[in-house]
Image (cartoon, grey):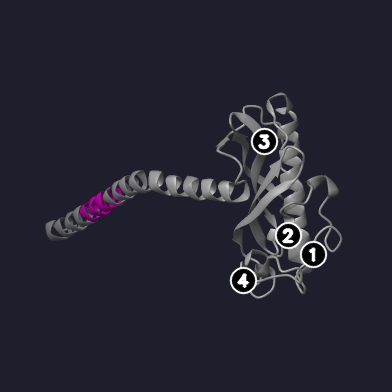
Amino acid sequence: MSSETKAKDSKSVFSMIKLGLILAAYAVAACTVLAVVNNITSPVIKQNQERKANEAMRAVFEQADSFKTPERSVYESSGNVTIDALRLAYKDGKVIGAVAQVTGPTYDTSTIMVGMKNDGTITGVQYLANTDTPGFGQKASDPTFHLANGKTFYEQFTGKNANDGFITGVTFDAISGATITSNGAADLLTAATNALKTVLASYADNAEVQ
């Protein structure tokens, strides 16, 4: 091998090493920037999520003056429904109920917030997310859609007692053309209220029935 060929090979190897170092430097820089951005945005995102959750809790349980995570959390997710969060509702230092956020299958997927008093009375229901079919399943969360009784789909649950169960077309009105969504909502409400009942039962000594 000639000295000229060796020089070319050495130059080629050096070029590859140089390119590799440059790419590695770019990768390190990119990761550093992403880490910095994540450190800056994560607290903001978390605060926004907590703010929205607090707003939803107050919307479904207006009587409460504060919400706290229960120390005795004896509840489980039900089937395909996940209990995302659960908070006790307080007024003047007494437990007057609780709220639960649940996610599960409807026609696609929905997330709702449910408030319930100690006696099982539903204080409110709010949709936080609904990816069901537009014009059909999404009517469940549409504040402009009203059932024959003049209420929105989710408003009709306020004042109902969870102990009566959630049976489509029997204990609540279904959305015409969106039976699967309506049945899915029943499953979400059942899972949420069952979890709420379980937790509230363990706080009966510090509860107040209103």
Three-letter amino acid code at the position of disc 1: Asp
Residue at left 72%, top 48%?
Answer: 122
Earlier in the chain: of badge 1 and badge 3, it is: 3
Q: Residues within 10 Å of mark 3 (few under 14, many from 20)?
A: many
Three-letter amino acid code at the position of disc 4: Thr
Three-letter amino acid code at the position of disc 3: Ile
Q: Is residue 67 above or below residue 121?
A: above
Which residue is the extreme one toward the right? 170
In this view of the protein, which residue sits in the foreground, 88 or 22?
88
Three-letter amino acid code at the position of disc 2: Gln
Circle 2/circle 1 CB separation < 8 Å: yes
Q: Which residue is mark 1?
A: 173
Tag 4 secondary structure:
loop
Q: Which residue is mark 4?
A: 144
Earlier in the chain: of badge 4 and badge 1, it is: 4
Magenta highlight range:
17-28
